[in-house]
Image (cartoon, rainbow, N blue to C red):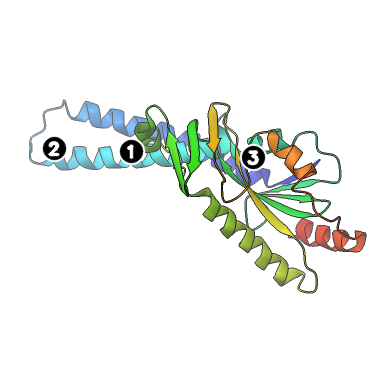
Amino acid sequence: MRIIANERYIDRRAKAGRYLSLAGLLVLLAAFIFSWIQIQTPTLMPLALGAALAIGILLSFTGGYYTERFGGPTAHHKGVRDALKGLDNRYTLFQYVLPVPHVLLGPSGLTVFVVRSQPGEIAYADGKWSHHQRGKFFRELAGQERLGRPELDVKAQVEQMRQFLKKHLPEIEVPVQGVVLFINPDTRLDLKDPPVPVFYGKKVKSWLRGPGAGKTLPAAVRQQLEEVLIKD
């Protein structure tokens, strides 16, 4: 499998995650120390302390968000690559170079990956998602992304790619499909009739080679598609 990625974009956000998290901890530490210091105008204490806490939490949250997506053990770009490792040279993975983060060009068209990296128990039943995890509130406070409704993200990203193709290749109809991909090794899935294809890690490969595989694109169409995707 070929990989075309905006490594500079990824590296910058990974570094931002580390620096912002550190800055947030330092601000919170300073706020803690400040709370023990006697100052001449005690009325300013609550305001100053509150401002420092708010800034520290905001920095920590933003840093944690970037670290989870770009720099931690469950960085999204690494998780997608690991899940797709072993696909042959008919496949090309595009990361952070197109309108949506992760797009796979395969023999029959495009597959968009909406990545989730939350640990814990993920369930879908009766039209609703649920997520159970120890300390979830504090993890989300530290920047962990909420599960939300992944199928809506899939729908939105698929539509973004369709509009992109309509603009650049208006005369060609290219199939675009989307899946939800969970990449955290501590994730446990319990799904009953999910509205979109949902997979954990490498299990997505068998789907891509089987039910997710459609009619092979003509060679000329494939070449035009590659030129547009790589050029962009």
**Residue 228: image location, x then y, percent:** 78, 62
Q: Which residue is mark 3?
A: 77
Between the C-alphas of marks 1 and 2, the distance is: 18 Å
Between the C-alphas of marks 1 and 3, the distance is: 26 Å
Sooner in the amino-acid sequence: mark 1 or mark 3? 1
Q: Which quarter of the rendering shows the N terminus?
A: top right
Is residue 15 in view? Answer: no
Sooner in the amino-acid sequence: mark 3 or mark 2? 2
Q: Residue at x 66, y 61 (%)?
A: 161
Sooner in the amino-acid sequence: mark 1 or mark 2? 2
Q: Viewed as shown, does residue 67 lie left or right of 225?
A: left
Disc on res. 180: none
Say if 166 sits above or below 132 in the image: below
Q: Nearer the viewer, mark 3 or mark 2?
A: 3
* Amino acid type, label 3: His
Q: Nearer the viewer, mark 1 or mark 3?
A: 3
Between the C-alphas of marks 3 and 2, the distance is: 44 Å
| Local SS, label 2 | helix
* Amino acid type, label 2: Met
- Residue placed most toward the observer, 6 or 195: 195
Q: Viewed as shown, does residue 59 lie left or right of 155?
A: left
Q: Which residue is mark 1?
A: 57
Q: Residue at x 48, y 31 (%)?
A: 121
**Residue 168: image location, x then y, percent:** 74, 69
**Residue 208: image location, x then y, percent:** 75, 44
Q: Nearer the viewer, mark 1 or mark 2?
A: 1
Q: Which residue is mark 2?
A: 45
Is residue 129 in view? Answer: yes
